[in-house]
Image: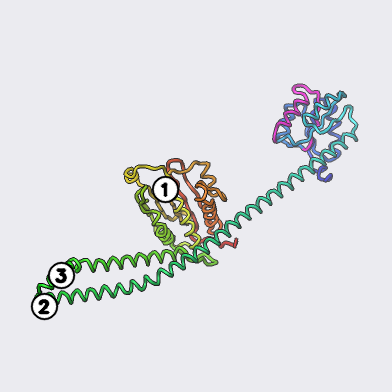
Amino acid sequence: MSAVHKKSSRVLIVDDNPTNLKVLSQCIKKEGWIVLVSTDGESAIAQAEYAQPDLILLDVMMPGIDGFETCSRLKASPKLQEIPVIFMTALSDPVDKLKGLNLGAVDYITKPFQTDEVLARMRVHLELRAMTQKLEYLVEERTAKLKQALEDLKQSQVQLIQSEKMSALGQLVAGIAHEINNPVTFIDGNLRYAQEYISDLMDHLKLYCDTFQETKEIRKHAEEIDLEYLLEDLPKMIGSMRFGTERIRNISMSLRTFSRRDTTKPVPYKLEEGLDSTLLILKHRLKANSDRPDIEIIKEYGDLPEVKCYPGQLNQVFMNLIANAIDALDSMPARPYKEIKANPKKITIHTETSDDNYAIVRIKDNGLGMTEETSKKIFDYLFTTKPVGKGTGLGLSISSHIIADKHRGELSCVSSPGKGAEFIIKIPFNPEPDNSG
């Protein structure tokens, strides 16, 4: 370590005596150290800030501010306070020496100088300075590694939670979709035939009415059952039943779309399909209740090309963002029903292609919005603005990981108090492969 000092150590000498400067400079240069010179306290402080010496030799008695005041100012500066200061003085009063040490000096050199003693003291403090700097570097390096290890652990936890959550949700939803689809297919198939059979029976009944003379009993029975209304309403009823089965079939398809398992590589996917399936699953939360009318959904789809992605994970992001938007709207202070009707709560979903070949999805609500301080924290691990028991602080953190790490994209938020919040997903159409596992 001494060899390092001889090549690179910088020593600032602060003395107004030319003879002292000459003697000290000559012996220091022989050691191979770099010599810096100042003749007063003010210029010494300025030069120390600029040159950042490794050691300062500081005379006590100088014109202008003396050595004690100079040392005090050096130690008050965050940039200079760690530089060791050795006082040079002819004073022999222990009180003066104690004053200098209390100000932060590390040693004293007494005039007239003994060259060997001066150099020996300087070597010791330069060695200590180098060892301290190396220790600080090692501490910083170890701290950085520990921080990175902690961050890696957090990310691993997020990925594990995400993987387990999506696996369990996927199995549950896929099973439900399968169980729904079987009876719906059976009912829909039978309704199709029932519609044809009823149409044939109605035609046959009409033929009877047109061919045979109506008796009093037949007329009475027809009036009792309101035959005319039955003939008009029965086809509508069958049509409604078929419409209902078709709606259940669409829900089943949306569940399968939402829960589709991801492959080890990105696959082409229409983002609008994922958005629509998510909206269908959340439709019950959008409906009117005793506190408000329906939450309006405004779709501004830009007919995006297919994006190479992990569909199941992107659907999870859509679910988190849209569900959060609904939570934000439902957490607004109560207003009269008519007032909300006149100025409805709404969520706008906009898709577009950027000039740099990225797919962009914007999910915006007209809720209360967030402060700048909150906006900066929303993607942090375990941070949540929701009451205890209603938020885990994982949804947006997981979503950010999915977009940034798995899709090489960006998830951001634009919000201000009173103006709602807009979450912006930006992902490349053909992302680079993710090797994070």
Instruction: Give the mark, 2 or 1, whose residue is nearer the N terminus.
Output: 2
Residue at 37 percent across and 67 percent down: it is 249
Q: Nearer the viewer, residue 21 or 375?
A: 375
Residue labelled with disc 1: 330
Which of the two discs, 2 and 3, sits closer to the camera? 3
Q: Which mark is residue 222?
A: 3
* Amino acid type for the residue under numbered disc 2: Thr
Q: Residues within 10 Å of mark 2 (few under 14, many from 20)?
A: few
Q: Residue 426 appears at what percent x and percent y?
A: 49, 54
| Residue 431 on the magenta span | no
Marks 2 and 3, how far apart in space? 16 Å
Which of the two discs, 2 and 1, sits closer to the camera? 2
Q: Which residues are magenta?
A: 54-78
* Amino acid type for the residue under numbered disc 3: Ala
Which of the two discs, 1 and 3, sits closer to the camera? 3
Marks 1 and 3, how far apart in space? 53 Å
Is residue 24 depicted above or below 282 in this figure? Answer: above
Instruction: Give the mark, 1 or 3, whose residue is nearer the N terminus.
Output: 3
Residue at 74 percent across and 48 percent down: it is 138
The picture quadrant where one finds residue 48 is top right
Mark 1: secondary structure: helix
Left or right: where 39 falls relative to 433: right
Residue labelled with disc 2: 211
Is residue 45 depicted above or below 263 in this figure? Answer: above
Instruction: Give the mark, 2 or 3, whose residue is nearer the N terminus.
Output: 2
Q: Residue 420 appears at what percent x and percent y?
A: 43, 45
Q: Residue 374 appears at what percent x and percent y?
A: 52, 43
Q: Residue 272 appears at what percent x and percent y?
A: 41, 60
